[in-house]
Every structure is written in structure tokens, then in C-alpha cells.
Image: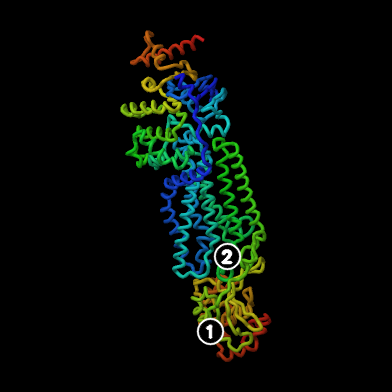
């Protein structure tokens, strides 16, 4: 398994952002759905080894990230795209991606080819020498994806990766996700259900820090059938139905 | 998904350890290409030209004097320090300001190591610029024919100071990743330099000698004017300052490795050791500076002193004649030999044949007076045989009243035996009469006395009073009569046994 999480919680002061989450996943594209504030980003940050869990057990790529040595080894094989990606305005696209390739301790001899490949995969080959300050928001998002995949990660964590991408780019990105999912565990946090439907083989739905549904996109779709839940697409109706059920159960408790 | 989930995790071959330094070098290359420091260098260059180079050009062409302002008083450091600290803080706060802290944290390279690459690139730009600017300035000096040897040790102090300011600024930025970190660090850098100047001006000894802007004793226009000419630049104090500044830099960089996200336990322990080692190094340097004592050739720190540095620089003197008396100076002062002979010629002519008249004149190294012995006496006359010894390095050149007149005044002062003080009234009167005969009217003498910086004792305000009245009497005598009186009374005059009433 690439990711094994057991009963993980994370608190920020009195706020419990993640409450007893368990999940396992191997290679493939895993969608993490949920409304704003559901805890998706916090869960992703724990998987990215940015923050440790308050309690519970996390194993990534067969290692415990609590120890420094294993954590460092995990990070060599990790790709991460944060929700709010900053950038160095004076760097070119190629330099930015190269910079993170070096920080990920890729063998130096492999870096130039890996950088070129990553940039091509996000369709920015013609802008490789452009300064980041000259790029649009969607292009910057693609640069972020390029840095995440430059080391051919075995665990790829993407937080709202399609935010700012135009429809054509989103279609291309979903294809890229499917391709990456052939060899790595790709976990995509999003609130756009169409991304999940198009690219994910498995999906989890979070609400109030908990996973309230885990299954395939088809299973999520099925939850919405005949419920009269809001939504324009079958998957959206499944999403709304699961959320409504989870919230009514919480209210009843 | 189940089948996919059960797929084994791939194992990757371990990395070659040789890749790590190469990787770090490439990281440094990226940081060097995209560092902010080069953008601020034109501003520093302009400031450097106005503040460090231009004021120095009014000084005589001797390395010790030409570099007194910019190296001895540390103006080259002042020109760099606030900007370097500010830019380093800007670079240190980069990831925090740019919202990249999370992303950088998730990479395998320890955060501290990545930060050190950013700092190293910043410091390399700053130190390289410092060395280039100073190098260009020194090249211009060399082209101008500045004599002596450059104060290389003080260049090393300046470069280390720039490194230290970059490290402290970077630490401020790394610990406080805000857009205000850069201006705050620049202000702190400026404040540190300002305080260093203030303390340096008022503290001539003790721990304050460690401050790179303190010119007292070690690099003073009068105290060590002949460093690099008669004897080498003593490295004792520069070494202590380099230790101090390097310690500050190391401690500041160590601090950036202490936070939890900087790296693993081993690395953070190493950072703690580095911090303590830096603090210990800086503290040791301050302690060493406290033991410094002033010697004739400069500041000596016993624990750092190498006796080999006390050996004088050998040279072939440049010689001429004044009234038939051989006059020799260090070749570094060769350009002033005609002035020295021109100054001495009428004086030596006037006293020719008198007892104790110098048979030769020679330049000696300017010697810093030992504590409590009063101000230095730049020109003295030794006995048996009488030799005029001139510490030309202590004479203000070119001087507001002219180098030649100062030499004449100092010669007359020494010849009448006035010693380190202003002399007795009768000695002052004879001195005034000799000077008038050498072409310096009485009216000009008070000003000359007041402005000959190294002449001891109070100078009269106006050429009036009993001293000048007696001098007028002596000067109005025929030359032969005056000469005869001096021949008869010179020994008593020098011994201080005469009064004004004894003058003819």
C-alpha cells in the first residue's frame, strides 16, 4: 500500500480539523471530495509530511513519517501541489522545476531530462524560459503540477489542481492524472466532482473532518439516485445526497 | 481499485553519495542566478564611490593614510552592511513571503541545507562585490602611485564583516518571514554600524577594539602612519576581528537550523553546536581584544602575536642634501624629499657651526607613544653624533600651513631643546627667531603652532607678549652676533637654565 492511515486526528488548538480518518490506497487516482472546511487540505498536508497527526497512525510508501530518516525517504518519492502555491517571480519555469528537482535530491544527471519532461507534460514546453511573473494563473498552476511530478513520485498529492485551468487544460490534466495513476498513488483533493468522475478510480467524501463516504465514483453516483438531491450531474447528486445524510445523522446524534 | 491498492511499493536504488555535493552545487548555481543581491549593487557602488573612495583622495599618497578613512574607520563596511543585511533578510524570508514554506518543507533536502544555499549565494554576491569594489579602489590607488603596502588584513576584515551582516540579516529573514524583515534588518545593520562608530571614537582600548570601525591605535593616521612602510601591518587585531565576525556569522547561521522544520534531530543538534561554537568564537575574540596593548608598530595581542611580524621592512633610502647635510628618507616618502631638504636647508644654514648641529638627517618610523608619555615629538636631535631623526609619518601632509613650514617649526623646536613640551619662554623665543630667519614671519607663527597637529603644548594666540618681544630683539641682531650668542649659550638654553632676560 502507498498510503495507510488509521484513525488519524489533527487539532489546531480547540479546532479539530481531521477527526478519526482511516483510509488505504495503492496506485491509482484517489479523489478526495468535500465542501470547504471539510478537512481535505489538512489531511493532505499530513500525508505530505508538512504536519504530523495529533493522534493516529500514518504510513506512507511503507514507512512511518514520524521518524526523520523514513520521512526523508518518503519525501524523495513524494510530489505535492499545495492549495495555494507560491512562486519565485524571478525564476523561469525551467529553473523553478529544476529547483524543486534538486530539493527532492534527484540524481543530478537525471535532472535536466526530468525537468524537460515534466514541463512538456503540463504543456509548457514553449514557455520553459519565461519568468514566472509573466505567466497567467492557470500557467502557474501547471508549473506547480510540473514541480510535483518532476521526480516521478510514487505518491502524488494534489490540492485543488484544476483551479484556474481552462476547460481544455482540465481535460488534458485529467488524462495526465490517469497516466500518472498507472504507476503511482495519486490523491487529488477537489471540490469539483466532475474531475473525480473523469479521472478517479476511487473517491472519499469528507465532511467536518471525517470521511463520510469511500468507494468508486459509480457507487457515489448510485447514492444520489432517487433521492431528489440537488445537482446537475449524477455524481453531484450523489455528492449532495451523501453530505445531506451525513449531516442529518450528525444532527440526530 | 483493490487490485491497484495491493500493488507492491516500488523500491528505488539508493542514491550515490557523490551526487549530494553535485546536487548542492547545482542548487547554489540556481540561487546565484536568481539572487536579489546584484540588483542592489549599483546603489552600493554609487555610495562606495561617494563615501569610501572620494574622501580618501584628499589624503597623501601613502597606503596607511589613503586607506585610513575607508578601511581603518570601516567606511567600506558601512557602505555595504545595511544593504547586505536587508537583502539577506529579503532572501531569508523568501519562502515564507512567497507562500512556499509548505512545499519546500515536503522536499527531501533538509530545510537548513536549502536555506544555507540561499544564504551562500547571497553572501557570495556580497563578498565578491566587496572584494571587487575594494580591488578596483586599490588598483586606482596603485595607478596613482600610492606608496607602501596595502592593508590586506583589513580587506579580509571587511569581507568577513560583509559575510557576518549577510548571515545576521538572513537569520532575521528566516526567523521572521515577513515583508518587513528586510527593512528591519537594514535598519539594524545601520544601527549596529552607527553604534560601532560611536563606541570606536570614544574607546581607544579594551574590548571595543574588536569593532571593525574602531581605528584607534591599530589604524590611526598618527598612530600607525608607517604601517606597511617601515614595518608590516600587524595582523593581530585583524585576526581577532575576523574571529569575532566569523563567530557572529556562524552563530547566526546556526540559529536558522534550530527550528523543528529545519531538519532532522541530528542536523538540529549540529545547528545547536554550530551556534554555540560561533558564540564561543566571537566571545573568545572579544576576550583577546581586551588583552591588546599598543606597541610602536601597532596593536599587539600577545596570544596572536607572531614575533616574525615585528621585523622591519628593509629598504634602500632615498637621499639628498640640505646645506651640505645628508638627508635620507624611506623611498615611500621619496616624493617629499625635495620638500624636506628645502625645509631643512635654511635652518641648517642658520645653525651651521653651532654645537649639536646634525651631521645628517634621517627618517625614522613613526612611533606611537607609550601610554602617559605625552604626545609624540616628530623631529628630534640625538647627540654623539648629532643626528636629526624625523618621523615624517607624524607630520600632517600636506598640512594647512604647509609641510615645509611644519618641518622648519619642528626642527627649531627640537634644536632649542624644547622636548616633548612647549618649552621654556626663552626656548620659545629663540625658536620664533630662528623661524623668522628661515622665512616665517612672527605674525604667521601662532597659526603655524596651532595647526601643526603633533606639536605639543599650548600655542600662543597672537605674536605678541614678552616671548615675541624677546624674539624680535634676537632676530634684529646681525646674523654674526646672533650666531655668536647661540654658540655661547646653546647648552644652557637646551638645559633650560636661561630666562628671557638673558637674551640680548
Q: Label 2 belongs to which residue?
A: B233
Give percent across and percent down for residue B78.
50, 54
For the residue pair A202 and B46, the one nearer the viewer reads as A202
Label annotation for residue A228: none
Q: Residues within 10 Å of mark 1 (few under 14, many from 20)?
A: some
Question: Quick one: which residue is furthest to the bottom in this view?
Answer: B480
> Residue beneath label 1, please?
B321
Vertical position of residue A128 compared to residue B470: above or below: above
Residue B328: x percent and y percent? Answer: 55, 79
Mark nearer the viewer, 1 or 2: 2
B294 and B166: which one is in front? B166
**In what quadrant of the picture does the C terminus of chain B appear?**
bottom right
Element at label 1: strand
Marks 1 & 2 on one chain: yes
Packing grade of label 2 (10 A; few <14, some 14-19, many >=20) is many
Nearer to the camera, A67 or A91: A67
Amino acid at each position: 500500500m502507498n498510503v495507510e492511515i488509521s484513525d488519524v486526528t489533527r487539532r489546531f488548538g480547540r479546532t479539530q480539523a481531521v477527526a478519526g480518518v482511516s483510509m488505504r490506497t495503492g496506485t491509482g487516482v484517489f479523489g478526495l471530495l468535500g465542501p470547504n472546511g471539510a478537512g481535505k487540505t489538512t489531511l493532505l498536508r499530513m500525508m505530505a509530511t508538512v504536519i504530523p497527526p495529533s493522534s493516529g497512525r500514518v504510513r506512507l510508501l511503507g514507512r512511518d513519517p514520524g521518524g526523520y530518516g523514513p520521512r526523508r525517504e518518503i519525501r524523495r518519492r513524494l510530489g505535492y501541489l499545495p492549495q495555494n502555491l507560491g512562486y519565485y517571480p524571478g525564476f523561469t519555469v525551467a529553473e523553478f522545476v529544476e529547483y524543486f528537482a534538486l530539493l527532492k535530491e534527484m540524481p543530478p544527471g537525471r535532472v535536466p531530462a526530468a525537468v524537460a519532461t515534466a514541463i512538456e507534460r503540463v504543456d509548457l514546453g514553449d514557455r520553459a524560459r519565461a519568468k514566472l511573473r509573466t505567466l497567467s494563473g492557470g500557467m502557474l498552476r501547471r508549473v506547480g503540477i510540473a514541480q510535483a511530478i518532476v521526480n516521478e513520485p510514487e505518491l502524488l498529492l494534489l490540492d485543488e489542481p484544476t483551479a484556474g485551468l481552462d476547460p481544455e487544460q482540465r481535460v488534458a490534466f485529467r488524462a495526465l492524472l490517469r497516466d500518472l495513476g498507472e504507476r503511482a498513488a495519486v490523491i487529488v483533493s477537489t471540490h469539483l466532482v466532475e474531475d473525480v468522475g473523469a479521472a478517479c478510480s476511487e473517491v472519499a467524501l469528507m465532511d467536518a473532518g471525517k470521511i463520510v463516504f469511500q468507494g468508486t465514483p459509480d457507487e457515489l453516483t448510485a447514492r444520489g439516485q432517487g433521492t431528489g438531491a440537488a445537482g446537475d450531474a449524477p455524481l453531484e447528486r450523489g455528492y449532495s445526497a451523501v453530505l445531506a445524510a451525513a449531516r442529518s445523522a450528525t444532527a440526530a446524534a | 481499485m483493490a487490485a491497484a491498492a495491493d500493488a507492491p511499493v516500488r523500491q528505488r536504488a539508493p542514491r550515490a553519495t557523490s551526487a549530494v555535493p553535485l546536487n548542492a552545487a547545482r542548487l547554489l548555481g540556481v540561487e546565484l542566478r536568481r539572487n536579489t543581491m546584484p540588483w542592489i549593487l549599483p546603489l552600493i557602488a554609487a555610495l562606495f564611490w561617494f563615501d569610501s573612495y572620494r574622501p580618501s583622495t584628499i589624503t597623501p599618497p601613502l597606503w596607511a593614510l589613503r586607506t585610513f578613512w575607508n578601511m581603518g574607520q570601516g567606511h567600506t563596511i558601512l557602505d555595504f552592511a545595511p544593504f547586505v543585511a536587508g537583502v539577506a533578510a529579503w532572501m531569508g524570508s523568501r519562502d515564507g513571503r512567497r507562500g512556499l514554506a509548505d512545499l519546500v518543507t515536503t522536499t527531501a533536502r533538509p530545510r537548513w541545507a536549502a536555506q544555507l544555499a540561499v544564504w551562500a549565494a547571497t553572501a557570495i554576491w556580497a563578498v565578491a562585490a566587496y572584494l571587487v569594489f575594494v580591488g578596483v579602489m586599490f588598483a586606482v590607488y596603485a595607478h596613482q602611485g600610492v606608496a607602501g603596502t596595502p592593508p590586506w588584513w583589513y580587506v579580509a576584515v571587511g569581507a568577513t564583516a560583509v559575510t557576518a551582516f549577510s548571515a545576521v540579516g538572513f537569520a532575521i529573514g528566516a526567523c521572521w518571514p515577513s515583508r518587513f524583515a528586510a527593512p528591519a534588518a537594514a535598519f539594524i545593520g545601520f544601527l549596529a554600524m552607527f553604534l560601532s562608530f560611536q563606541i570606536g571614537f570614544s574607546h581607544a582600548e579594551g574590548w571595543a577594539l574588536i569593532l571593525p570601525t574602531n581605528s584607534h591605535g591599530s589604524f590611526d593616521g598618527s598612530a600607525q602612519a608607517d604601517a606597511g612602510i617601515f614595518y608590516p601591518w600587524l595582523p593581530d587585531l585583524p585576526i581577532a576581528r575576523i574571529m569575532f565576525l566569523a563567530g557572529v556569522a556562524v552563530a547566526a547561521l546556526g540559529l536558522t537550523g534550530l527550528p523543528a522544520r529545519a531538519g532532522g534531530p541530528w542536523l538540529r543538534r549540529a545547528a545547536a553546536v554550530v551556534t554555540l561554537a560561533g558564540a564561543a568564537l566571537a566571545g573568545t575574540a572579544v576576550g583577546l581584544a581586551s588583552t591588546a596593548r599598543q606597541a610602536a608598530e601597532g596593536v599587539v595581542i600577545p596570544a596572536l602575536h607572531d614575533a616574525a611580524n615585528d621585523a622591519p621592512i628593509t629598504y634602500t633610502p632615498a637621499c639628498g642634501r640640505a646645506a651640505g647635510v645628508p638627508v635620507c628618507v624611506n623611498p615611500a616618502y621619496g616624493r617629499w624629499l625635495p620638500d624636506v631638504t628645502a625645509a631643512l636647508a635654511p635652518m641648517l644654514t642658520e645653525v651651521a657651526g653651532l654645537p649639536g648641529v646634525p651631521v645628517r638627517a634621517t627618517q625614522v618610523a613613526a612611533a606611537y607613544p607609550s601610554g602617559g608619555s605625552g604626545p609624540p615629538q616628530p623631529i628630534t636631535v640625538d647627540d654623539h653624533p648629532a643626528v636629526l631623526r624625523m618621523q615624517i609619518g607624524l607630520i600632517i601632509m600636506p598640512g594647512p600651513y604647509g609641510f615645509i613650514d611644519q618641518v622648519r617649526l619642528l626642527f627649531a623646536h627640537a634644536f632649542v631643546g624644547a622636548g616633548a613640551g612647549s618649552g621654556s619662554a626663552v626656548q620659545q623665543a629663540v625658536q620664533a627667531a630662528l623661524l623668522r630667519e628661515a622665512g616665517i614671519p612672527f605674525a604667521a607663527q601662532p597659526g603655524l603652532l596651532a595647526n601643526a597637529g603633533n606639536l605639543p603644548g599650548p600655542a600662543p594666540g597672537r605674536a605678541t607678549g614678552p616671548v615675541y618681544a624677546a624674539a624680535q630683539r634676537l632676530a634684529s641682531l646681525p646674523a654674526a652676533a646672533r650666531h655668536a650668542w647661540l654658540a655661547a649659550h646653546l647648552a644652557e638654553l637646551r638645559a633650560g637654565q636661561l630666562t628671557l632676560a638673558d637674551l640680548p
